[in-house]
Amino acid sequence: MDRKTNIMKSILVTGGAGYIGSHVCYALKQQGYLPICFDNFSSGHRWAAKFGPIVEGDLLESQEIERTIEEYKPFSIIHLASFIQVGESVKNPAKYYENNIAGTINLLKAVQKYEIPYLVFSSSAAVYGTPEYTPIDENHPLKPINPYGHTKHITEIILQDWDKAYGLKSVSLRYFNAAGAFPEEGLGEAHEPETHLIPLMIRAAQHQKAIQIFGNDYDTADGTCVRDYIHVLDLANAHLKALDYLVTGGETVCLNLGTEIGVTNLQMVNLIEELFSTKVPYRFLSRREGDPSVLLSSALKAKELLNWQPKYKISDILQHAWQWHSKEIYGE
Ligand code: UDP
């Protein structure tokens, strides 16, 4: 697509004030689009929503999303709004099914009413459940092991049915471990509560307070879990590529977004210690429920279909995250 012809074309980004959503809005603005940030601010931040109009709204209120689409007439939707905490989803599945599924249905009914042709959906590697082989490609069986993963899987199925019945073309992007930051733009990870490894490990190093590492008896090189960390700016860029793919006639598809490079939790300790000449205090705890030993993505299909590949290395991810957490520039 010639992006010059799309100057100020608006795109509705649900969850646009969140960690990934804010980076997506930045990337859209950079390319000349107008990102409309639709967020209920239950976990998003006002300081992160600064790249276009902001609509404080909730997908559970169908009039709010309809009104927004009617007003801004977006030519596409990027749908990231969802609850994301695995542990919470196990304890309170009703909250997850209501927000992630019922909210999505309200959005999709509005998409259908206003005949919006394209949607990019923020899915997750959680759709695969416990890996049967690695690297995980898109043909791997889909057997989520918690309600959060179920909501992502169910949404992918709903999107396939929406295509068959109403012609909505979509790309579901199955994120592996999003990490890193964009400190120059004042963007980075600020979850409350924070449960992710990299921010917690950096905080542990910066405040010399031990992090708990969940499990050291996994069947991996050093006994700790392996994850595939992908820079949030690489993820954001993939959303633009997915839009290009749809606009140029691409079929509805699900794609992994990962790097094919695995890092164990203990390797992460070493990387941080080497990069920042510091100590990461840690102690081992028992395994966290629902943690697969290895999550490693095949990145072939996204490369093939979107012409996308990650640009940032794990050292960049850590440098940017370190800078972001050092400044503590966020806060409302
Ligand atoms: N992890 C850990 N201690 C923490 C947080 C995470 O040992 O305080 C581990 C977790 O068990 C997993 C890896 O770090 O092996 C990545 O976890 P994270 O929550 O960042 O992402 P997930 O892979 O669960 O989406």
Image (cartoon, rainbow, N blue to C red):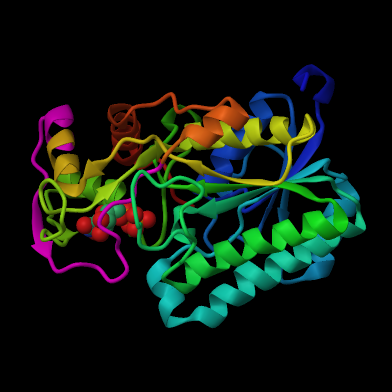
Magenta stretch encompasses residue 122: no
Locate residue 83 relative to residue 190 in the image: left or right: right
| Residue 186 in view of the camera | no
Locate residue 309 relative to residue 25 in the image: left or right: left
Magenta stretch encompasses residue 289: yes
- Span of residues in magenta: 272-297
Image coordinates of residue 165 in percent, x first then y, are: 85, 60
Q: Residue at x 68, y 24 (%)?
A: 31
Of 296 and 87, nearer the camera is: 296
Quarter of image, res 246: top right
Most prominent secondary structure in the magenta stretch? loop
Q: Residue at x 29, y 34 (%)?
A: 318
Image coordinates of residue 90 in percent, x first then y, are: 42, 77
| Residue 274 in view of the camera | yes
Of 162 and 53, nearer the camera is: 162
Image quadrant where one finds the N terminus:
top right
Q: Residue at x 34, y 42 (%)?
A: 228
Q: Is residue 330 above or below residue 89?
A: above
Q: Is residue 64 above or below residue 34?
A: below
